[in-house]
Image: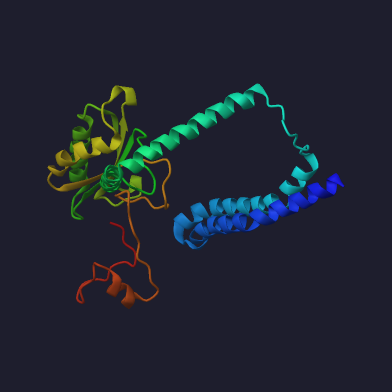
Amino acid sequence: MRRRRKRRAALRGSAEIGFTILSISLSLVAVFIPLFLMPGIVGRLFREFAVAVTATILVSVIVSLTLAPMLAARLLPATKATPHRSWFYRVSERGFDALQAGSGRLLDIALRHRMVMLTLFAASVLATGLVFMRIPKGFFPQQNTGLILGTIQTSPETSFAEMTRLSLRIATLVQDDPDVATVGLSLGSAAGLTENQGRIFVSLKPRDARNASASAIIRRLAPRLAAVPGARSYLQAVQDLTVGGRLASTQYQYTLQDANPAELDGRSPCRPSRAGPRRRPGRSP
């Protein structure tokens, strides 16, 4: 008889909270639906996360409506009129009661000063918007690995000897920076480039021996390298995690591809002239 009562109580309790659990769980699942449909690299990164969270929510719903009530009916003992409470329960309950009383007093103070609280709310929303606009944003955070990779570009008619002279001058300017440890150069076909291109590899000093990050050093070197006539230098901080397998002069690049060259010419921001040669279907800034 007692077991039957426990079973009826468990079924009645699960029926009372069933709609609430279903509505909340379906709302949580709906939040992750855009991640299932998101294309590109971002979608691939977050799809497994969305699947894991959604499966966890669904399993939690099933357990909450079936297994948990039945376990409660089987395992929980009957409640006495004056149950004996342990010392830990009594101490923690006093703490919860004090917390509830304190929050009630704070709520009363807030309700007595409604205009002040409304002003603080508006100020916090405005400050949040200002901070959001000022903080740096990006898909991956910029790492300070201590390595800088650069590309040196000169005009196509530059000879290899002139290219060597300009590259050594750029390497000297980079080496003169107080936070740079070593500089390496690779020119022409040895680096898989043409004769008017080169690679520069910069190794920075340890973090405790320098005062600036790799990005700050790049910004500091940019005006010095731009003053070298006849050569353009592009520097970027080496990252452990990169998207895409192509090595380019800049950290960010985009590619335009199309099977129809006429449509590609119309979409490309750099349209070829009718008399001149046609550009390649892909380009990276």
Q: Residue at x 33, y 76 (%)?
A: 263
**Compared with residue 28, is residue 185 higher up or lower down, i.e. above or below?**
above
Which residue is at the front of the view, 277 or 201? 201
Q: Position of residue 8 (x, y in %)?
A: 78, 52
Q: Residue at x 55, y 27 (%)?
A: 94
Can the viewer see residue 240 in this picture?
Answer: yes
Can the viewer see residue 142 in this picture?
Answer: no
Q: Is 245 on the left or on the right of 120, as rendered?
A: right
Q: Quadrant of the C terminus?
A: bottom left
Q: Position of residue 101 (x, y in %)?
A: 47, 33
Q: Is 181 on the left or on the right of 90, as rendered?
A: left
**Compared with residue 245, is residue 279 higher up or lower down, i.e. above or below?**
below
Q: Position of residue 191 (x, y in %)?
A: 34, 45
Q: Quadrant of residue 265?
A: bottom left
Which residue is at the front of the view, 158 or 135? 135
**Compared with residue 98, is residue 29 higher up or lower down, i.e. above or below?**
below
Single out the residue that lies furthest toward the right: 1
Q: Residue at x 26, y 30 (%)?
A: 212
Q: Quadrant of residue 184?
A: top left
Q: Position of residue 83 (x, y in %)?
A: 72, 30
